[in-house]
Image: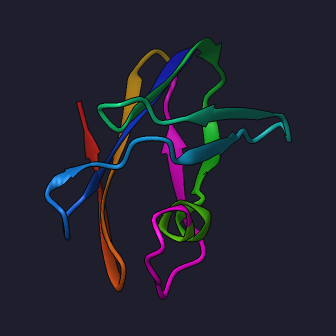
Amino acid sequence: MSSFSTHVLDAALGRPAAGMEVLLSLADGSTRPGRTDDDGRARVDADLPAGVHTVRFETGTWFAGQRRTTFYPAVTVTFTMTDGEHHHVALVLSPFSYTTYRGT
């Protein structure tokens, strides 16, 4: 079994993306909802199965809450989780671009 975390950074403002809704969808069809904390981090503290999973970041809702427009209403990242490891998917975001990487 494995674990999951994420960290979302607002590159345009140079600070964490606090309060963003995040949904982790597992290969078996189950989901784990979350929200980034004041430091832009969210974590699933459960043993998760290996497989191909997705994490969806609700970027449109988050930007709208700040009265900012964005080109991306959501960002979905599909990744492979291997058994027995921690998986950290980081998202660096601005209203008109994003990048993601596997962190630690």
Q: Which residue lies furthest to the left in this view?
A: 14
In this view of the protein, which residue sits in the foreground, 28 or 18?
A: 18
Q: Residue drawn at (52%, 18%), measured in percent from left and top?
A: 2
In the picture, measured across the screen, residue 101 lies left or right of residue 86, that is left
In this view of the protein, which residue sits in the foreground, 37 or 91?
A: 37
> In the rendered view, would you say 86 is above or below 95?
above
In the picture, measured across the screen, residue 71 lies left or right of residue 96, that is right
Residue 63, magenta (yes or no): no
**Residue stretch in magenta:** 65-83
Image location (x, y in percent) of residue 104: 23, 30
> In the rendered view, would you say 82 is above or below 78?
above
Image location (x, y in percent) of residue 59: 52, 65
In the picture, measured across the screen, residue 71 lies left or right of residue 94, that is right
Q: Residue drawn at (49%, 41%), measured in percent from left and top?
A: 19
Image location (x, y in percent) of residue 66: 45, 64
In this view of the protein, which residue sits in the foreground, 65 or 81?
A: 65
The N terminus is located in which quarter?
top right
Dividing the picture into quarters, in which one does residue 98 lie? bottom left
Q: Residue drawn at (50%, 19%), measured in percent from left and top?
A: 3
Residue 76, magenta (yes or no): yes
In the picture, measured across the screen, residue 50 lies left or right of residue 91, that is right
Q: Residue drawn at (60%, 59%), measured in percent from left and top?
A: 58
In this view of the protein, which residue sits in the foreground, 44 or 16?
A: 16
